Image (spheres, rainbow, N blue to C red):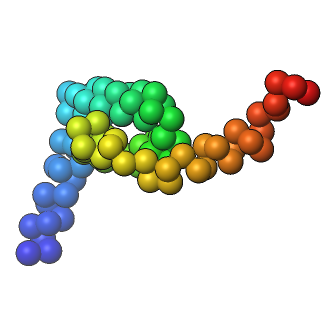
Amino acid sequence: MLILMESIEPQLIQFFSQPWFVLPLIVWSSFWKGWALWKAAGKRQLVWFIILLLVNTLGILEIAYIFYLNRWDIDKGRLLKFLEKKFVRSKKS
């Protein structure tokens, strides 16, 4: 079994590193990530935006967010309100 794996492993690495295999995955993932980030930013959901930006799942989390998870604001906007209060100067000053 070990000998079989040693002979198959280099072939798998070579297959998965081919541009014709990797490029469609990059395009697929970028499309869904961009759409999900756009939607999270539009809804001012900072926590979701950060999660979507940092976690790469080849579009799975992004698709779930776009069609289902965007209904829930994880922290009810508290983080964004805190950051705005802390870093945005009031217009009166």
Q: How many labels sit on residues?
A: 0
Relative to 48, residue 7 above or below? below
Q: Position of residue 37 (x, y in %)?
A: 42, 33
Who's the residue at 20% across and 33% down the image? 21
| Outermost residue toward the front in this view | 92
Who's the residue at 18% across and 65% down the image? 6
| Residue 62 in view | yes
| Screen quadrant of the N terminus | bottom left
| Residue 18 in view | no
| Outermost residue toward the bottom in this view | 1
Relative to 63, residue 55 above or below? below
Is 68 left, or right, of 88 in this rendering? left
Residue 88 in which image quadrant = top right
Q: Position of residue 3 (x, y in %)?
A: 12, 71
Who's the residue at 34% across and 41% down the image? 70
| Viewer-nearest residue: 57 or 24 | 57
| Outermost residue toward the right in this view | 93
Is 46 left, or right, of 18 in this rendering? right
| Viewer-nearest residue: 34 or 66 | 66
Q: Position of residue 47 (x, y in %)?
A: 50, 48
Who's the residue at 19% across and 58% down the image? 9
| Screen quadrant of the C terminus | top right
Is 81 left, or right, of 69 in this rendering? right
| Viewer-nearest residue: 43 or 5 | 43
| Viewer-nearest residue: 57 or 69 | 69
Relative to 11, residue 33 above or below? above
Residue 52 in which image quadrant = top left
Q: Where is residue 67 in the image (x, y as percent from the top left)?
A: 23, 38
